[in-house]
Image (spheres, rainbow, N blue to C red):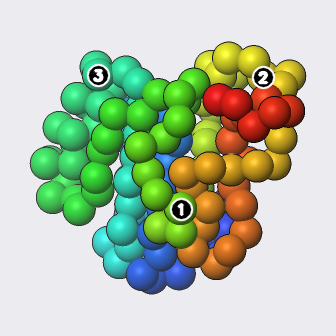
Amino acid sequence: MLDLLKLQPGMHILDVGCGAGKQCFSYYSYLKGQAEITGGDVSQDLLGQARQEKVKRDAKINFIDLNFNQRFPLEDNQFDLASCCFAIYYAENVPLRSARCTGCQNRAGWPCSWIYDAEGNE
């Protein structure tokens, strides 16, 4: 499955709703640690598990507090890939979507789709 993403060494990857970090660790292993990976989640318990696993694996992954239903505390153009595996159903206002992305446009210039209503409000 990861082959479909055409992951390359040196990529900057954001995993939204990372939970205990399973997907982050998959990216990290696949790229042999040659990527900057950030995982974000609202659950302190799951982030704690991810951080413990990070220490066990001696993995260079950044785990941050990230609430799916608020504006991300991130700047545009810092990620090559943003993923969200099995977390979108936790979003509020799921029917109100647009392709507009603020806070996670990727470095290649194409937007990632996140949660905004038709007026661009979070």
Decide if residue 95 is on the left or right side of residue 114: right
The residue identified by callout 3 is: 44
Q: Secondary structure at mark 1?
A: loop
Decide if residue 52 is on the left or right side of residue 95: left
**Nearest to viewer (mark 3 / mark 2):** 2
From what the image shows, is residue 108 above or below residue 57? below
Mark 1 to mark 2 CA distance (whole Å): 23 Å
Instruction: Residue 65: tell me if it is visible.
Output: yes
From what the image shows, is residue 8 above or below residue 96? below
| Viewer-side residue, 29 vs 115 | 115
The residue identified by callout 2 is: 94
The residue identified by callout 1 is: 76
The numbered mark, 1 or 2, whose residue comes first in the sequence reads 1
Task: Name the image quarter holding the C terminus.
Answer: top right
Residue in view at x 57 percent, y 55 percent: 104
Q: Residue furthest bottom?
A: 9
Decide if residue 16 is on the left or right side of residue 50: right
Expressed as whole percent of the image width and height from the top left, the position of residue 6 reads 65, 76
Choose top left, top right, bottom left or bottom right for residue 29: bottom left
Residue in view at x 32 percent, y 41 percent: 64
The numbered mark, 1 or 3, whose residue comes first in the sequence reads 3
Badge 3 crowding class, 10 Å Cα cut-off, few under 14, some 14 to 19, many 20 or more, is few
Q: Secondary structure at mark 2?
A: loop
Badge 2 crowding class, 10 Å Cα cut-off, few under 14, some 14 to 19, many 20 or more, is few
Q: Amino acid at mark 2?
A: Val
